[in-house]
Image (cartoon, rainbow, N blue to C red):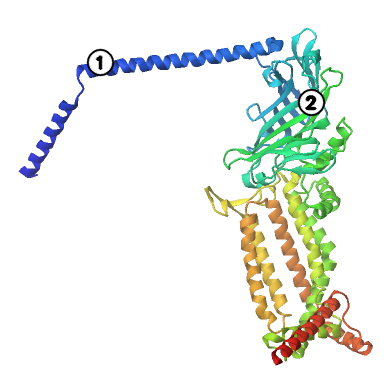
Amino acid sequence: MNKNSVLGFVLIAAVLLFYTWWSRPSAEQIAERARADSLEIVRQQQLIAAQEAETAAADTLAIDSTSLFHACLAGEAQQVVLRNDKVELTLSSKGATVERAVVKHYKNIRGNDGVILFDEETQRLDYTIALKETNISTSDLYFTPTAVTDTTVTFVAEASPGKMIALEYTLGKSYLLHLSLRTLGLAPLVLPNTTSMDINWRERCAQQEKGHSFENRYSKLTYHKVSGGTKKLSETSEVKDKEIDDAIDWVAFKNQFFSAAMISRDGFAEKALLSSKPEEKGSGFLKDYEAKLKVPFDATGKTASDFEFYYGPNDFRLLQKTEKESTFGKKLQMQRLVELGWPLFRLINRWFTIYVFDFLTSTGIPMGVVLILITLLLKVITYPMVKKSYMSSAKMRVLKPKLEEATKQYDGPDQQMQKQQAMMQEYAKYGVSPMAGCLPALIQMPIWIAMFNFVPNAIKLRGESFLWISDLSTYDPIIEWHKNVWLIGDHLSLTCILFCVGQLAYSWMTMKQQKDQMVGQQADQMKMMQWMMMIMPLMFFFIFNDYSAGLNFYYFISLFLSAVIMWALRHFTDEEKLLAKLEEKYRANKASGKKLSGLAGRLQAMQEEQARMEEKRKELERRRKGR
């Protein structure tokens, strides 16, 4: 370091020391700051004291304004546990409602026994009665539990002798909890013409399965109208205070495999407000549900307000039984909590898939084998249609040389109509309908879609392992990572990869078969369709990577069997004999003058009519130009 550098540092230090000395506060300034700090401390203390006084005054006012139940506004909450072989329900004397519901004999997300639907921090239920001076909310009151057994309890909040609110609970043998709510001696205190009671029910629905996105897709606030029919709120977007114009029988806070439902004997009145808000992945919750309801209320206490609560699995057969176990004698249709698809697909699942599935699972065989056997049975049922579709394609394939010979003079871009007519005429000669292979293929689609709805909602697959799959009801990752990747998520599912590879192989076989029967420019026109069919498995990967392993496994087995059937039909079909039969039919049709009938015949007639109209248009155009 040279002398100039040393001198520079010395000058800088001198300037800093001088500035520090010059800018320091005087003794008077220091004293003034201390006094200001002391005043600020005093002001903060006064503000805190004022807030505490305001809170105390509000509490005193609340107690005074509800002096009717003064003795019930303070106390210590007591827990009462009702249990049977199916559920364990913890009720709190604060509010006299169920604060914790555990469904037995099912594993939770951590693999322990018992699924906790909700607890005191994630659920709130409040009944509000409008009195002349104020509103009485049960959530504010401390009740006294009486008549306690393993399955019954009565909570009583007494305002004064002869004036009380009573909630009587009875747990049935299964998943239904019955509640009778009545008031005694409060009629003179209730607002005139009061015939209803307000209910506010809210629950933060907990995640119960490994796949948050997949489970969230099947978690929906669902309700049943008194007039019939089940509706649900959107599972993907937030719905705030949706007003329901119809009276409803029940409201269910549903996740994929379990539900908490509230049923009213007299029905919830019109104008109910229902809300559903999806929760973020990683929060441990699926939805934030809320229902603001009104029910008929008899202030005299002669007629109780009766409710039933269902805390249990979304099992189709069990939900059917709840209607029989209910004491209300209503057509509840609780089984609609198990989504079976749109009407056509629901019929397939309701009257075929469920019966077969129940029969196979009753034998005790592994669930993966059950899916394989269902797939085999469906293939046996649809085999005649598959064979008909294949034979139609085979006929067109063996006729390809004849079609090319009959249409070779129509290669111009403006001659495609004539080419199609020539092809249809050739088909008519040999009694072949090009549409015959389409309808059987379309008939199989409802089965695929029906299984798409059934498998993710089959609770019996939950927790069941098969081969490398630890749980058929959720995805089976071969690799996982913590960061969410766009379109893929945070894992790769092996069964999804197998399904997509199977779809790719099956698409290749199908395209090869279709290409063998294409004539002329049809093969070129097919290239775009071929690209689409090759891209489809990639699209399926992005869609199904988050879906259940059971569904992907079913689709993989279905595609594998379809490929085997196609190979077998191709291998065992003697195309020379098939062509000979077509030639024989051609000679018979030629002798009788028979034309193509059915849908293909109508299509040919339409093409001929279009050709006549096109010729007429050209003639008019020539006349116009000749003027």
Q: Which mark is residue 196?
A: 2
Which quarter of the picture shows residue 145?
top right
The residue carrying pointer 2 sits among few (fewer than 14), some (14 to 19) or many (20 or more) residues within 10 Å by Cα, namely: some
Which quarter of the picture shows residue 379?
bottom right
Q: Residue at the spot x=72%, y=63% of the render?
A: 559
Q: Quadrant of the N terminus?
A: top left
Q: Is residue 236 visible?
A: yes
Q: Residue at the spot x=85%, y=37% of the render?
A: 321
Compared to residue 363, the image places residue 429 above or below, namely: below
Q: Residue at the spot x=15%, y=26% of the render?
A: 21
Compared to residue 585, the image places residue 24 above or below, namely: above
Q: Residue at the spot x=67%, y=52% of the render?
A: 549
Q: Position of residue 47 (x, y in %)?
A: 45, 16
User: For this rendering, which residue is in front, 27 or 445?
Assistant: 27
Q: Are marks 2 and 1 in contact (CB under 8 Å)?
A: no
Which quarter of the picture shows residue 242?
top right
In the picture provided, is 139 more to the left or to the right than 394?
A: left
User: For this rendering, which residue is in front, 554 or 131?
Assistant: 131
In the picture provided, is 455 more to the left or to the right than 14?
A: right
Furthest residue toward front: 627
Could you tell me which secondary element the residue under label 2 belongs to?
A: strand
Q: Position of residue 567 (x, y in %)?
A: 75, 72
Could you tell me which secondary element the residue under label 1 belongs to?
A: helix
Q: Is residue 74 visible?
A: no
Mark 1 sits on what residue? 31
Q: Amino acid at mark 1?
A: Ala
Q: Position of residue 458 (x, y in %)?
A: 75, 46
Q: Quadrant of the C terminus?
A: bottom right
In the picture provided, is 591 more to the left or to the right than 360?
A: right
Compared to residue 487, the image places residue 94 above or below, namely: above
